[in-house]
């Protein structure tokens, strides 16, 4: 069971990285287009919140099985 939980935490880390990339792309696109629309800002904030949640979820799972957290500052 510990291996399965660790595997899920690793997948959450992967999702977190993907979400970070999407957030960066949204910010870069807004800068390139000089887009200050509320919709784009809300989307970027939502993606960033989701990334933080996945990092936290992975950390909680690792704590539950006594594994080390690869993102101790997140």
Image (cartoon, rainbow, N blue to C red):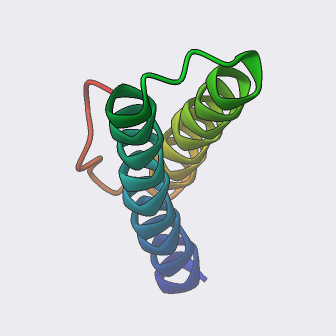
Q: On the rendered structure, is 65 left or right of 1?
A: left
Q: Residue at x 53, y 42 (%)?
A: 51
Residue 4 in the image: x percent, y percent?
56, 84
Quarter location, residue 33 = top left
Residue 5 in the image: x percent, y percent?
57, 73
Indicate the quadrant containing the C terminus: top left, top right, bottom left or bottom right.
Answer: top left
> In this view of the protein, which residue sits in the foreground, 60 or 10?
10
Q: Answer above or below: position of 18 versus 34.
A: below
Q: Answer above or below: position of 51 versus 68.
A: above
Residue 12 in the image: x percent, y percent?
52, 63
Q: Residue at x 39, y 48 (%)?
A: 25
Q: Answer above or below: position of 21 versus 50.
A: below
Q: Residue at x 33, y 38 (%)?
A: 28
Residue 72 in the image: x percent, y percent?
26, 32
Q: On the rendered structure, is 39 left or right of 63?
A: right
Indicate the quadrant containing the N terminus: top left, top right, bottom left or bottom right.
Answer: bottom right
Q: Residue at x 36, y 54 (%)?
A: 21
> In this view of the protein, which residue sits in the foreground, 18 or 44?
44
> In this view of the protein, which residue sits in the foreground, 10 or 16?
16
């Amino acid at each position: 069971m510990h291996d399965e939980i660790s595997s899920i935490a690793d997948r959450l880390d992967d999702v977190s990285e993907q979400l970070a990339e999407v957030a960066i792309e949204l910010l870069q696109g807004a800068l390139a287009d000089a887009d200050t629309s509320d919709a784009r800002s809300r989307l970027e904030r939502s993606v960033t919140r989701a990334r933080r949640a996945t990092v936290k979820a992975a950390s909680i799972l690792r704590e539950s099985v006594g594994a080390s957290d690869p993102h101790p500052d997140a």
